[in-house]
Image (spheres, rainbow, N blue to C red):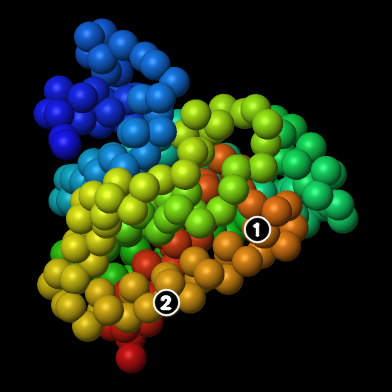
């Protein structure tokens, strides 16, 4: 049974954990809030994408599309504190530079960035920038919103099927097994936006993301036996850029 005040508390917990937005003091903090808050991860993504889209539209009145997209990306990076990009870099350093599971987890835990992580960030951010800059403005706006929400939905799907591999860690309270009902709420918050204004592109995007989701999940299991918080950020970033590239390929075909 949903309790509106508890659900509001979980939403604000998600907002405070995944962004730099201050939350009301009455929300408080308990470790179990974080696990319950995971269902609102896509809704937070929807808000992040909305801020990015708004900055893009405002900037587009003054600057060319390429500059407007960069300003939009900068706004989302500031809003989230590059939370997911950090996971992307850590995972590329770990998976690219380690041979054993323990080495991968150790490198992933290291706050320093290596060559693999730096190159991955450059490539992924450049792909986002170029894909969005070449899209028609209103299509770019909608894909920004849809991609931020849908990519987070697919990222937290690993909470349904994989095990968290660290005994402790920042993501440990979040990374308990998610119930099907909680994930259903995440799907409702995160996926419908992909189907407007073109439901065919939405179906194509979902199909591509499902294939990627299983491929990435199998890779996580093979390399480290499950996932970490960094793995979720890594997955979210790859899912997000895939949505942009799928949209660009669709209108270019």
170 displayed left or right of 53: right
Element on which disc 1 rests? helix
The location of residue 203, given as percent across then percent down, is: 27, 79
**Residue sitting at x 29%, y 70%:** 135
**Residue sitting at x 33%, y 91%:** 253
How far apart in space, not on screen, are marks 2 and 1 (Cα)?
A: 18 Å
Q: Residue 89: in sight, yes or no? A: no
Taking the view exactly as shown, the residue that stands out farthest to the right is 99
Viewer-nearest of labels 2 and 1? 1
* Badge 2 or badge 1: first in the primary sequence: 2
The location of residue 9, given as percent across then percent down, is: 24, 23
Taking the view exactly as shown, the residue that stands out farthest to the bottom is 253
Residue where numbered disc 1 is placed: 220
Image quarter of residue 201:
bottom left
Judging depth in this view, the residue of 88 and 57 nearest the camera is 88
The location of residue 87, given as percent across then percent down, is: 58, 43
Image quarter of residue 146:
bottom left
Judging depth in this view, the residue of 167 and 131 nearest the camera is 167
Element on which disc 2 rests? helix
**Residue sitting at x 23%, y 66%:** 194
Judging depth in this view, the residue of 19 and 166 nearest the camera is 166
Above or below 197: residue 228: above
Residue density around tag 1, few if under 14, some if 14–19, many if 20 or more, within 10 Å = some
- Residue 208's label in the rendered image is 2
Residue density around tag 2, few if under 14, some if 14–19, many if 20 or more, within 10 Å = some
């Amino acid at each position: 049974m949903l309790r509106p005040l508890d659900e509001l508390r979980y939403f604000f917990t998600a907002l405070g954990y995944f962004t730099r937005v201050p939350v009301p003091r009455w929300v408080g903090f308990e470790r179990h809030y974080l696990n319950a808050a995971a269902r609102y991860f896509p809704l937070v993504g929807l808000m992040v994408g909305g801020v990015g889209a708004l900055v893009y539209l405002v900037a587009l009145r003054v600057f060319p599309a390429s500059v407007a997209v960069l300003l939009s990306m900068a706004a989302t990076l500031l809003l989230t504190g590059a939370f997911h990009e950090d996971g992307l870099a850590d995972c590329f350093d770990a998976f690219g530079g380690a041979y054993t599971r323990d080495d991968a987890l150790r490198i992933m835990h290291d706050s320093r960035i290596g060559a693999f992580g730096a190159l991955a960030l450059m490539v992924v951010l450049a792909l986002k920038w170029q894909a969005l800059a070449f899209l028609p403005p209103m299509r770019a706006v909608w894909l920004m919103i849809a991609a931020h929400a849908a990519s987070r939905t697919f990222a937290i799907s690993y909470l349904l099927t994989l095990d968290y591999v660290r005994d402790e860690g920042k993501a440990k309270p979040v990374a308990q097994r998610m119930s099907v009902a909680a994930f259903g709420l995440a799907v409702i918050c995160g996926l419908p936006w992909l189907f407007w204004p073109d439901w065919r592109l939405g179906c194509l995007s979902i199909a591509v993301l499902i294939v990627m989701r299983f491929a990435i999940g199998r890779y996580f299991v093979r390399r480290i036996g499950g996932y970490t918080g960094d793995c979720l950020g890594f997955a979210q970033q790859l899912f997000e850029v895939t949505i942009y590239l799928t949209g660009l390929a669709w209108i270019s075909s």
